[in-house]
Image (cartoon, rainbow, N blue to C red):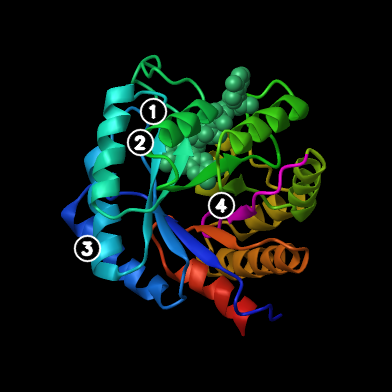
Amino acid sequence: MTINKTVPVNFEFFPPKTEAGQAKLIAVANVLAGEQPEFFSVTYGAGGSTRDGTRRTVLQLNNEVGVPAAPHLSCVGDSREDLRTLLNDYRDCGIQRIVALRGDLPSGMGHASGELRYANELVEFIRAETGDHFKLEVAAYPESHPQAPSFEADLKNFIRKAKAGADSAITQYFFNADCYFHFVDRVRKAGVDIPIIPGIMPITNYSKLARFSDACGAEIPRWIRKQLESYGDDSDSIKAFGTEVISQLCERLVEGGAPGLHFYTLNQAEPTVAVLRNLRG
Ligand code: FAD
C-alpha cells in the first residue's frame, strides 16, 4: 500500500494540563514534524476553558517546533469582545490559520453565554474583524452532526458556513469512506468547491474510541467493533488491527480524491506515524 507521498497531512493536538504533558507534547510534535505536515492545530475548550493553554501551545508549536500552528476557536461561550481580543493577539503573534467552530460547552459549564450561536456567525465575525488575514477552516460532518435535525439541514448549514467565508473544511472522523464521498459529492452539487479534508482517528483503545464516537456521532461499523471487542485487553492486537483498518481507509480516501488527511493524534505520535509509514512506504 503506497500512496502519493506528497498528499498533505496535518495533525491536531489538545492543550496539555500539566508541565509534564506540555513537554511530552512538544516531543511528540517534533517527531510528527518529521512527517512534514502542512500545519498543526490545537483544540479550544468551549467557553474559554483552555484559552491560555491553547494560545501557549499554538505559539510553542509555531515558534519552537517550527510548523505553522492553527488555534481552534469556538464561539459558544465567548463574547464578541473575548473573540476580538484573541483574534488580534493571534494576528499580532503571526498566526495565519484558525479552525472556526461553534464548540460544545463542557458539561457543568451551564448554558451557552456567547453572543454568536453558530460557526457560520463566527466565520462572518472573523472576516468582518480581520478581513482575509486568517485562512479559515470549518468543521464538516459526513455522517451528520449529532444535533442536526436531518442530513439535508446539516448539509445546508455546512454550505452556509462555507459561503460565510471558510477557505477549507476538516471532517469529523468516520470509518466508512463512502459517507465522505457522498458528502463531498452533495457539497459540490450545491456549487461549493472548498477542499474538504477527512479527519482521521487512529484506533488504539476500544473503550475510549466507543465513548468518543457515541458522543460525536461517529459510527463504528459492526465488523470493526466486533473485532476490537474480541481483542479484550490485548493492546498490541488492537493497535495492529487499527493501523491496518485506518491505513486502508486513508488509502481509499486519497485514491478517491481527498485533498489531504487531518489526524486526530490525541497527543501521540506513534499511531499516526504507523499509518503514514504504511501509506508512504
Ligand atoms: P455549527 O456548524 O455551528 O453546527 C452546529 C449544529 O447547529 C449542527 O447541528 C448544525 O446543523 C446546526 N446549525 C448550524 N448553523 C445553524 C443555523 N444557522 N441555524 C440552525 N442550526 C444550525 N469542539 C470544541 O469544543 N473545541 C474544539 O477545539 C473542537 N475542534 C473540532 C475540530 C474538528 C475538525 C471538528 C469536526 C469538530 C471539533 N469540535 C471542537 C467539535 C465541535 O465544536 C462540535 O461538533 C460542535 O457541536 C459543533 O461545532 P460546529 O462548528 O460544527 O457547529
Circle 1/circle 2 CB separation < 8 Å: yes
Q: Is mark 1 within 8 Å of ligand 1?
A: yes
Amino acid type, label 4: Tyr
Badge 2: residue crowd in 10 Å (few <14, some 14–19, many ≥20): many
Circle 4/circle 2 CB separation < 8 Å: no
Query: How far is the residue under mark 2 from the one under mark 3?
Result: 20 Å
- Identify which residue is drawn at 61% across, 71% down: 7
Amino acid type, label 2: Gly
Q: In the shown orientation, is residue 67 left or right of residue 259?
A: left
- Residue 156 included in the magenta stretch of the image: no
**Residue beneath label 1, please?**
106
Q: In the shown orientation, is residue 174 left or right of residue 263?
A: right
Q: In the shown orientation, is residue 90 left or right of residue 257?
A: left
Badge 1: residue crowd in 10 Å (few <14, some 14–19, many ≥20): few
- Identify which residue is drawn at 78% across, 52% down: 181
Q: Which residue appears farthest toward the left when viewing the image?
A: 19
Which is more toward the observer, 108 or 75?
A: 75
Q: Is mark 3 within 8 Å of ligand 1?
A: no
**Residue beneath label 4, please?**
206
> Callout 2: helix, strand or loop?
loop
Badge 3: residue crowd in 10 Å (few <14, some 14–19, many ≥20): few
Q: Position of residue 69 (x, y in %)?
A: 36, 58
**Residue beneath label 3, please?**
23
Amino acid type, label 1: Pro
Q: N-terminal of the two: label 1 or label 2?
A: 2
Q: In the shown orientation, is residue 269 left or right of residue 191?
A: left
Q: N-terminal of the two: label 2 or label 3?
A: 3
> Callout 3: helix, strand or loop?
helix
Circle 3/circle 1 CB separation < 8 Å: no
Q: Nearer the viewer, mark 4 or mark 2?
A: 2
